[in-house]
Amino acid sequence: MKIKIAWIGKTKEAAIEALTAEYLKRISRYAAVEGVALRDEAPLLEFRGRVASSRRGTMARGANSTLVLMDSQGKEFSSEQFARFLRDYQDRNPLPLVFAVGPADGFSEATKAMAQHTMSLGKITLPHGLARVVLLEQVYRALTILKGHPYHSGH
């Protein structure tokens, strides 16, 4: 499975950069992963493919990944549920999985219309850099759950 973690905007905090690099390294032990800093949302639409159909989440020919937006209005998962989501995705879909942490004012309607999934990290509000680190940690945790690694002890 190929995973991309994309975020909008530059990171100013060295601690966020360090944690991002650490979790990308950890994830790479279990899956092909790439971290991508984007200037704006336009490249997300390119990751997805160029021609959208009129129905939310479906694409005409040209889709080249599955887009998952991180949004406070998205579906919440426990760590175990998120691990099952990744396992099920891996079992049935060869396309890369792109998780996107958006700009401070949220994703545009065009980007929302292109996404196949919208997930939430919870009801609390997080700065975008911290949301990225939490997402990376949860991807790592989910992969360790799937591999039976003791990192996740079930609490």
Image (cartoon, rainbow, N blue to C red):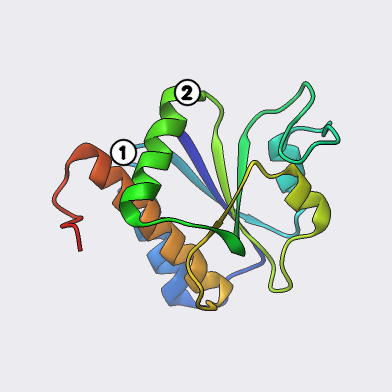
Quadrant of the rendered image containing residue 79: bottom left
Q: Is residue 118 positioned above or below 98 on the image? A: below
Q: What residue type is labelled 1?
A: Tyr
Task: Provide the secondary structure element on which disc 2 rests.
Answer: helix
Note whether residue 112 is visible: yes
- Residue at 42% over, 57% down: 136
Residue 68 x %, y %: 59, 47
Q: Whole-percent x and y of residue 14?
A: 46, 75
**Can you see residue 71?**
no
| Amino acid type indicated by mark 2 | Arg
Question: Mark 1 falls on what kind of element?
Answer: loop
Picture quadrant of residue 86 = top left
Mark 2 lies on residue: 92
Residue labelled with disc 1 = 30
Which residue: 53% across, 71% down? 129
On screen, 61 above or below 49? above
Q: First in sequence, mark 2 or 1: give its number.
A: 1
Please say if 124 is above or below 45: below
Look at discs 2 and 1 and give the one toward the viewer: 2
- Residue 119 as seen in the image, left or right of residue 85: right
Left or right of 112: which side holds 15?
A: left
In which quadrant is the N terminus drawn?
Answer: top left
At horizontal 73% and vertical 32% (from top left) the residue drawn is 58
* Total numbered labels placed on residues in the image: 2
